[in-house]
Image: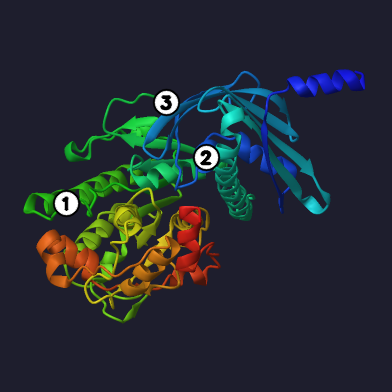
Amino acid sequence: MTDSEKRKGLQKKPTVGRFTKKSIFNSPVDSVFSWHERDGAIERLSPPWDPLKVIFKSGGIKPEAVVILGMKEGLFKYKWHAIHTDYEKNRLFRDKQTRGPLSSWVHTHRFEALKGGRCSLEDTIEYKPYFSIFSKYILDSFIRKKLNRIFAYRHKTTAADLELHQKFAYLPRKKVLISGASGLLGQKLIPFLKTGGHSVLTLVRTPPKTEDEIFWDPSRGILKAADLVGVNAVINLSGENVGEGRWSKAKKRRIVESRVSSTRLLSETVSALTPKPDVFISASATGYYGDCQAETVTEDSGPGSGFLSSVCRQWENAAQPALDSGIRTVFMRIGVVITPEGGALGKLLLPYRFGLGGRVGSGKQYLSWIGIDDTLASFYWALMNGSISGPVNVVSPNPVSYLEFSGTLASVLSRPAFVPLPTSLVKLIFGEMGVEGLLFSTKAIPARLMDTGFYFRHSNLEEVLKHVLGK
């Protein structure tokens, strides 16, 4: 092509934005490429402050493979249709928007092997907004800032997940059965496990739609042992949401029964299998310890008093059949999980963004928290580390007071925090649920995780809030 022809071509080329993010990984190129090929990679790379939903996908990342994503920008929801157009094993794959919010979008994922078993990943986006001549100066800065936040998160998450998966790469991959898979933790745990090379089956209470779903009904004691043959790990997350609504007698009964009946049925069923699963991991909560005031508690501490403590004791006791049958049994006593997609932070974001945050009660009560990524990693650690059994506190090593939590969240959001929620108002609005959920103090330490060498990605509250909020 002559210089004149090139110039003419450039003149005809539409205005296109270009964004590039390149990172070095301490992992071989085949590991990083395979991680992106596996089912669950799209969901795992979805940032918590800007989540997406996979509506349809087929063919992995090979040419002609299709994916349709449900996305959201502020109050506006839309679908993103893309097709993969190029594929070179351990070198690159490319996807192109076929329908979506931009006039054009081409995303190239380029991999390069480096010395010392490392590799680089370069994500390049070439995009063109609609009405690009008029929107160039309006939208381009917004698009670039958003891409920078998203891909900083994606690369950081990929590197950390790979590092954890590689610690146990010498062990066989597991066939994991999960109950409570539709909950927030279950939805996040499934892609985390799949990108690690494990297969996942889920228990559902409606007719199964895929071969990876198994029907059960704990209220009627229905679960076929034949459907579980070959399962070598169980993760039990079933249970009514304790933070939704006041605790009426009916609500409290559902909270208990939803945990006890499902855990007992599941533990009894897998205990009768031949061969039995290697491990039974059951969710629990730091509510086990009750109101501890300023006392530090570890897994060796006894139970407290109150409704939640009673629930946790019954919940853990329901797994006794698995323990008696010789299955390695782990109780994950989970603290407040930090993610904007649900839980405490999900409820607090709106008032805090309007400057309506502040201390709860005296503000002196302790909050045992943990980031969503460390929660997933803790479950994986318990799944793969055969030395772990019994209770495990799934919390950061740095619990904070509610006053410190309130101030830190407000600071990250660049908002004031001077609207308190007095104890009397907590009791009036939320009743018993508010007293135990907001006013009880739990200063739990993850002694079992630390003793076994677990590495926390985010042990600082401000750090984790910035990570999950894309700040």
- Using a 10 Å C-alpha cutoff, classify the residue at mark 2 as few (fewer than 14 neighbours), some (14 to 19) or many (20 or more): many
Q: Nearer the viewer, residue 69 or 374?
A: 69
What x and y, as percent, mark residue 74?
Answer: 40, 40
The structure residue drawn at horizontal position 38% and vertical position 58%, both measured from the top left corner, is 337
Q: Quadrant of the N terminus?
A: top right
Is residue 381 found left or right of 236 in the rendered image? right
Write the residue at 39% across / 33% down. 76
Q: Is residue 301 positioned above or below 18 on the image?
A: below
| Crowd rating for badge 3 (residues with CA inside 10 Å; few <14, some 14–19, many 20+) | few
Residue extending furthest toward the right: 2
Residue picked out by circle 2: 194
Which tag, 3 or 2, sits closer to the chain's start?
2
Horizontally, is 191 left or right of 405 in the view?
right
Which residue appears farthest toward the front when viewing the image? 134
Q: Position of residue 242 (x, y in %)?
A: 22, 54
Q: Is 88 or 280 nearer to us in this picture?
A: 88
Position of 160 with respect to 381 (left or right) is right
Question: Which numbered circle lies on residue 245?
Answer: 1
User: What SS does tag 1 mark?
Assistant: loop
Q: Nearer the viewer, mark 3 or mark 1?
A: 1
Answer with the quarter of the image where residue 182 lies: top left
Task: Name the mark nearer the viewer: 2 or 1.
Answer: 1
Q: Residues within 10 Å of mark 1 (few under 14, many from 20)?
A: few
**Residue 242 seen by the camera:** yes
Q: What residue type is disc 3 on?
A: Glu
Question: Which label belongs to residue 363?
Answer: none
Kind of residue indicated by mark 1: Gly
What distance separates the C-alpha of mark 2 from that of mark 1? 34 Å
Q: Position of residue 342 (x, y in %)?
A: 34, 50
Which residue is denoted by mark 3 in the rendering? 211
